[in-house]
Amino acid sequence: MTRDDTGGRPRPVVIDTMGGDHAPEEIVAGAVAAVREHGVRLVLVGQAPRVRAELERHGVTGEIPIVHAEEALAMDEGALASWRKPRSSVAVACHLIKTGRASALVSAGTTAGVVATARLRLKAQQGVLRPAIAVLLPTRPRPTVLLDSGASVDVKPEVLVQFAALGTAYAQVALGVPRPRVGLLNIGSEPGKGNKAVRRAYELLSSGHHGIEFAGNIEGGDLLTGAVDVVVCDGFTGNVALKTMEGAVRMAMAELQQTIRSSATAKLGALLQRRRLQALKARLDSETYGGGVLLGLNGTVVIAHGASQARAITSACLLAQDLAAGRIVERIRDQIAATRTSRFGWRHGDKSDRETKPEQEPPVPPEQEAGRDLPPPP
Amino acid sequence: MTRDDTGGRPRPVVIDTMGGDHAPEEIVAGAVAAVREHGVRLVLVGQAPRVRAELERHGVTGEIPIVHAEEALAMDEGALASWRKPRSSVAVACHLIKTGRASALVSAGTTAGVVATARLRLKAQQGVLRPAIAVLLPTRPRPTVLLDSGASVDVKPEVLVQFAALGTAYAQVALGVPRPRVGLLNIGSEPGKGNKAVRRAYELLSSGHHGIEFAGNIEGGDLLTGAVDVVVCDGFTGNVALKTMEGAVRMAMAELQQTIRSSATAKLGALLQRRRLQALKARLDSETYGGGVLLGLNGTVVIAHGASQARAITSACLLAQDLAAGRIVERIRDQIAATRTSRFGWRHGDKSDRETKPEQEPPVPPEQEAGRDLPPPP
């Protein structure tokens, strides 16, 4: 799927221009910057007349190909949108990846809608039981990968081991860490701590037969200390932890502003520091590292923050290009294969696992297959 | 168990003087302050000669009764300590509650050890499937109760409903909120979000037949906004969220100090603001609201932060006294009864629930029963 079938020329990144609070204006603006300033090859998917008008506003005509899509996922639409809107811009974009005409997808659409559509259209790559959304936490000296931040809840221990493999591949490609250290998010550092799934995952990861550099349990308080390169957890825990972290930083900053404002003698200092504090807030704020990457499907999906402005979209395009160039899908395949040749002894596509999946992927009815009569890519 | 069988005189709060990083010095100092400044009735449990020596240092002799306990739980000891040390200070203190000679326990010992010992000695109160640790989050205008923060992992939906009942009783007694609003910690605000246990708990709580003021799902980002009075989750999620929050605040403050220090022009302002910022940090820091309250057993256990100094111990003594005076155990009994008379239809002590408990309470062998030959309380 990810092999280069365009004669050596890298396949373009496809952008969903219709997803996000500021679509399509900011999305197209970010795409134009990615092309002009960074030379990224792009395809834009969306309502062609609107996208063309936006491109013209930037003085771009004919340089960036457009693929028309009738529909768009609304920002308040959930997972069912993948069924209700078989010709949404996200579905059409996935089709371009599936047919080898694009390498990776960028969307600032609703996470639930994008994930559901991508799962339905791209399918899990071979050997992967469940996909995961990886996000980067703003640690020093380099970011920490947290996954899953919300794609897969109620996961089995074997799935947590696979998340360790996905995270390892992602840290290698996106952060350039040769042997990423992987921690298991838990409620204590000792073995034997945690719920059933985590306790068993600890045993599996400790066995050391899967090419993962397992660093043991880490606690919530270690997420921002850069103690490990990759933190693994189920999608429920990861989502709660991520949003809790964002909320805590927001609260601390609000308290700080309150403190500064309420102090007459400190006003001078506050003025002097305002700019630095704003820079700090931006670094900690969710929007700067906003969004995540959906890993484990036949094609990589960069989900930008819904509130993304042009700059965030440009960053997302660069990340998507880097991941495609780093052959993330192949890296994941190799990592997953390493976990499977170990003695964990679970079967790929284990029936019992599928039965307990709340968001099990239904088969796509032929009449809902999107984009089958799409024009060939330019 | 909590009825007043001392002829109208309130029963004393019992303090484990041997638990905590600064035991027994700071524990005894905090106890002395609670007695002298607030008139709390106390019993101290611990190695009598050491406790007596500490009391003498404060010029207190004979005012505060001491009950001797040979052993103490080490700060690195886990749940097994409850078995290994049947005569630990915590076990002896629980025995005093069980036999009606004390109303509530304060310990700064290791959470795992205190919880395991208390569960073994005090037992779950009638109708309660699993105990929970409630902590107070520093929201405004009043704190928010979060439970469970780590006592019970792998819980069924019915247990989450019970946690809502425990949290309601706690908010009523500790915060004086007549009808506390209860939120379910989840990964989205809509019904149908979350893992299996949480989705089912949402249905049960929405049925509205249990005397709980259910306010729906809340997300991690809402934990510190004071959106609800009580937040309910399983002990794994709660522990991760709490530690993540503490870590994020710590990180934000460290970044802030870094920012202030690195800015030459801002040094003056930093000097002016230092005191206010320290006050802010103290408010946000875990140690100020440190510790939690173990709810659902036949007796209330206030678990102070392991690093507690005297002042934190004094606060914990006051909280324990307030909870006992507010008849928290009876309030919980009534709340639990309200959930049971609703149409949830689960059976108390459901066999299938017990089978899946990782930390199932084993029966106490008669030879390990602690403190059976204790001297009668003074």
Image (cartoon, coloured by chain):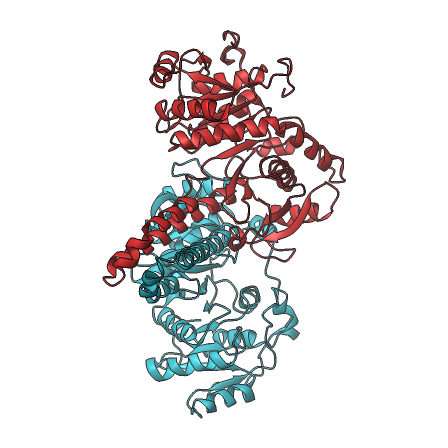
Chain colours: A red, B cyan
Left or right of A113? Residue B266 is left
Q: Please state which of residues B157 and A217 is positioned toward the viewer in this rendering.
A: A217
Instruction: Identify the residue shown where x is 41% and y is 55%.
Output: B259
Q: Quadrant of the N terminus of chain A?
A: top right
Q: Residue A305 at what x, y percent from top left?
A: 42, 34
Which quarter of the figure has residue A52?
top left
In this rendering, the answer to whether A348 lies above or below B308 is: above
Decide if residue A364 is in sight here.
no
> Horizontally, is A276 left or right of B123 in the view?
left
A45 above or below B106? Answer: above
Q: Is residue A114 left or right of residue B39?
A: right
How far across and down, in percent of the image, does residue B10 sit?
Answer: 36, 79
Q: Position of residue B203 (x, y in %)?
A: 41, 40
Relative to A38, say whether B258 is above or below: below
- Height in image: B334 above or below A321? below
For image coordinates 64% across by 13% down, the residue present is A7
